[in-house]
Image (cartoon, rainbow, N blue to C red):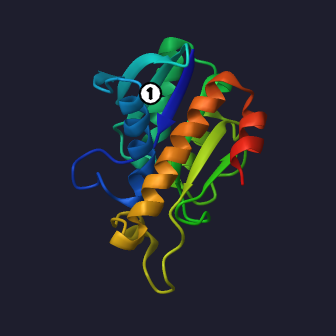
Amino acid sequence: MKWIVGLGNPGPQYEKTRHNVGFMALDALAARHNIQINQSKCKALIGEGHIGGVKTVLIKPMTYMNLSGESLRAYMDYYKADMDDLVVVYDDLDTEVGKIRLRYQGSAGGHNGIKSIIQHTGTQSFNRVRMGISRPEPGYAIVDYVLGTFPKKEKELLAGMIEDTCDALEYSLGHPFERTMAEFNK
């Protein structure tokens, strides 16, 4: 069984924000495979199904970004889920809008959701898909930027990035993550 955790904040006020691209990607992947992400378990909304013949669980923590690790840890403990079968999908300021970067380890890089996951799992080694949101202009507060929506000029880049993320996630279910990285880190 594989499990994919998309990071974001719950509630309609955050739905279309840059910080919620992880949720957007999971929703798109769920739609591709007719998976309903609607079971409330482990401080998260969860959907289960098969993607390419692989049993896959899609998880959207409902703890708010800064506490994402609580939900992930609760799921791990309850279901005895293995970190090797995990992929975390989230927004990244250091990646250009429209681009994705895959990694299998590293620091939180200032991302509070990843910081929480590292804190609750005790490791920096887990598979990740970082979705680019670019950095704001100098003088623009980071918190306001990540909680802001994408401007119209970035809508096409966002749509393409969500599709690329879904493609990478699907590919990762049937291939080693290193091979997935080689395929999708362009």
Whether residue 116 can be seen here: no
The image quarter containing residue 94 is bottom right
Depicted 77 relative to depicted 166: above or below: above
Check the picture and name the quadrant holding the N terminus. top right
x and y, in percent, of residue 128 in the image: 62, 42
Check the picture and name the quadrant holding the C terminus. bottom right
x and y, in percent, of residue 110 in the image: 58, 60
* Relative depth, front residue between 96 and 167: 167
The image quarter containing residue 126 is top right
User: Would you say 85 lies left or right of 90 here?
Assistant: right
The image quarter containing residue 25 is top left
Depicted 159 relative to depicted 1: above or below: below
Report the residue at 52% width, 64% height from top. Answer: 97
Whether residue 49 can be seen here: yes
Report the residue at 67% width, 46% height from top. Answer: 102
* Relative depth, front residue between 118 and 12: 12
Label 1 amino acid? Leu
Report the residue at 68% width, 46% height from top. Answer: 184
Q: How many marks?
A: 1
Residue for badge 1: 58
* Disc 1, SS: strand
x and y, in percent, of residue 130 in the image: 59, 51
Name the residue furthest bottom: 139
Density class for disc 1 (Cα within 10 Å; few <14, some 14-19, many ≥20) is many
* Relative depth, front residue between 64 and 93: 93
Report the residue at 56% width, 13% height from top. Answer: 80
x and y, in percent, of residue 159 in the image: 43, 54
User: Would you say 15 lies left or right of 21 here?
Assistant: left
